[in-house]
Amino acid sequence: MTTSRIDAEAICREWLAGNPENSAALVWLSEILLEKGRPAEAEETALAALRGTPASVRALKALGDSRLRQGRLDAAVKAYSEALTHDGDCAEALASLGQVYHHQKRGAEALDMCARAAALAPRNPRIRAAFAVVLSDLGRTEQGRQEYREAVALDPDLPTAAPALAARFRSEKDAPEESATTPLSALLVYILLKLSTLPKAEAAALCERLSLHDALASLPHDRTVAAVPTQRFQEGVRDLLSGDGTAALAAFRDVAEAFVGMMESGRVAEASGLADIVMGRLASLGRSDLGHVAGALAGAVIALSRGELAEFAHLARLRLYTHTDGLFNELVSAVLSLTAPPDPAIRPDGVLGVSTPEQLGAAVDGLRADGYRVMPGRLPAGLVEKLVDFSLTCPADAIFEDGRPVLRGARINLNDPDAVGYNLDSQAVLDCPDVQHLMLDPSFWAVAQEYLGCKPLCVGAVMRWSLPSQNRKPSDALAQYYHWDAGWVRWLNFFMYLTDVDMGTGPHVYVRGTHRRGAKPHELRKRFYARIPDRDIARLYPGQDIVTVTAPAGTVFAGDTRCWHKGLQPVHGRRLTLQFSFASTVLMSNQFFGHKLMLRRTHAPEFRDFLSRNPDAFPGYYYDRE
């Protein structure tokens, strides 16, 4: 292949030696140079061709291609647009212009150009594949997948030539029922099952005893799997997908017992085969990459023994969320919630104003539909006043607008012209008796339980001052760019305004319904865990779905912060908020504050009594006890 390219370039140059103004040869040479990764030379050659034939559509297309390859998008648009003035039905110019518009985040124009190109050239697989990408990134996933399938039908070699594109459009039914992994899968599953049932000290000892290298080296290659546990696993999957959680849990427990029995009786190869089936099916159900599944699982194993989530596992879990549009999280959450069913003893009485079944149902229905819900009840004025007073004496991390490092253990000075905010010390917030009292309010636990579908875990409280700034650039440290949270598999946050909040004091903003699958277009998810500019949110979502929460002090609203959300930068006043977070499981989660908090013997008696009656409500993954 390389030889033919070199020969083609040599032939073109030989023709041009005899006739330097041979436009056809110049255009061909430009295309060859671009294919060989020399876009600057390709642009110069295309311009030379246009000097002789300024209306050449092919030369203008080559010029646009060379500029696009150099990242000069506006110049590429100019070349493609000029080509279309000479031939408005040039499908390749339309498709290329659509791709540039796509890079420029001009979604509607990109869609129009690529749709016209595909209609004009329905037998061109490259144009059909480009149209598929634009459709997918604009949230029209199934239509994009169908367009890609038609492109592959036209060119069966397309998946091999562009494997990343193939992976992007792989559907659940395209995924193999069983994935060929390594015996490491079996060891990871085995360790996870063992560690989840052992005390921490024994779990750590087990990790030290296990030698993955020796175990892998000794594994036989025969991987026959017993039919009974495989059949039970498939039954469990069917039960789970049909909504019969009890039957699914029973089936998965049978499979787990069979698996552990295989490992402990020395039938490692058989257990390895079973693990392949389980993990491969999990990847298929979640439409996710098996390597990310293994990474997240391995990280969960390490976290259970060490008390912290490894960075590779955190990234794997984020990738699983973005690649599957949240499907993997929902699948894991559905399985894990079966092990901690709702506690009927939790009553909804309390400050949130959801004491009746109708009020509780309305609040949770609103959360499920919109992702956020302002609660009908408010915090008592006296409690709000005490929390504000506490905040002014609490040690905090000061955040500055001029790029200086965060100042740990600072004294709060709301008049400091350089400070844009303060994150209050997390241990000091937990030690506050008024915060403890509020954390025990049963209405928080009832709403969280009803929404999560399981007994909730309290994973932390955050208190934060946001201050006006002369700098018009929002603060990333104060979450003033659009983002989604990713601390846990499934969670719910409660936000409490402790000061009056209007448009000038930094209100919370969210995009309605974007916690649901299908609401985040691939165009944004492919940026991974990135802050999103306002212009992209405004372009992709209708204005009525971008909701700003202005409200008086004492207002409480719940949020599934898988939604796009942010806090606006204050311009004339200060904002103080308190936030409680509840999760469905600590598995595959981060430590909320980067370290454990201490549940002290000096905490309020009613708080210590609650802990003694509900030891799992404040899990050991996040808290130590004196």
Image (cartoon, rainbow, N blue to C red):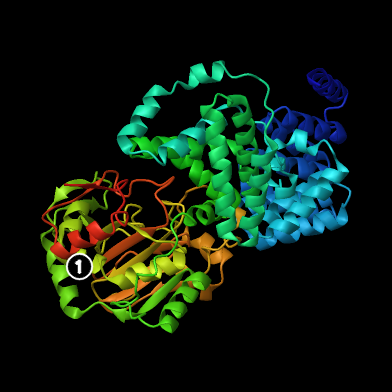
Estimate the x, y position of residue 610 in percent, counting from the top left. Answer: 23, 62
| Residue 311 point in image, percent of width and height | 41, 37
Is 109 displayed left or right of 214 in the figure? right
Residue 119 image offset from top left, x and y in percent: 85, 58
What number of labels is visible?
1
Name the residue type under label 1: His
Whether residue 139 is visible, yes or no, is yes
Q: Quadrant of residue 618?
A: bottom left
Judging from the image, what secondary structure is the residue with disc 1 in?
Answer: helix
Which quarter of the rendered picture does the N terminus lie within?
Answer: top right
Look at the picture and state if 28 lies above or below 590. Answer: above
Please name whichever residue, 19 or 304, is drawn nearer the observer in this view of the structure: 304
Q: Which residue is mark 1?
A: 437
For the point 83% across and 49% down, the residue is 150
Which residue is nearer to you in this view: 221 or 123? 221
Left or right of 208? Residue 362 is right
Query: Quick one: label 1, few (<14), some, or many (20+) residues within 10 Å?
Result: few
Decide if residue 512 is in sight here.
no
Residue 34 occupies which quadrant of the picture?
top right
Query: On screen, 299 above or below 55?
Result: above
Residue 609 shown left or right of residue 297 in the figure = left
Give the percent coordinates (x, y) of residue 626: 16, 47
Depth check: give the residue in front, 425 or 402: 425
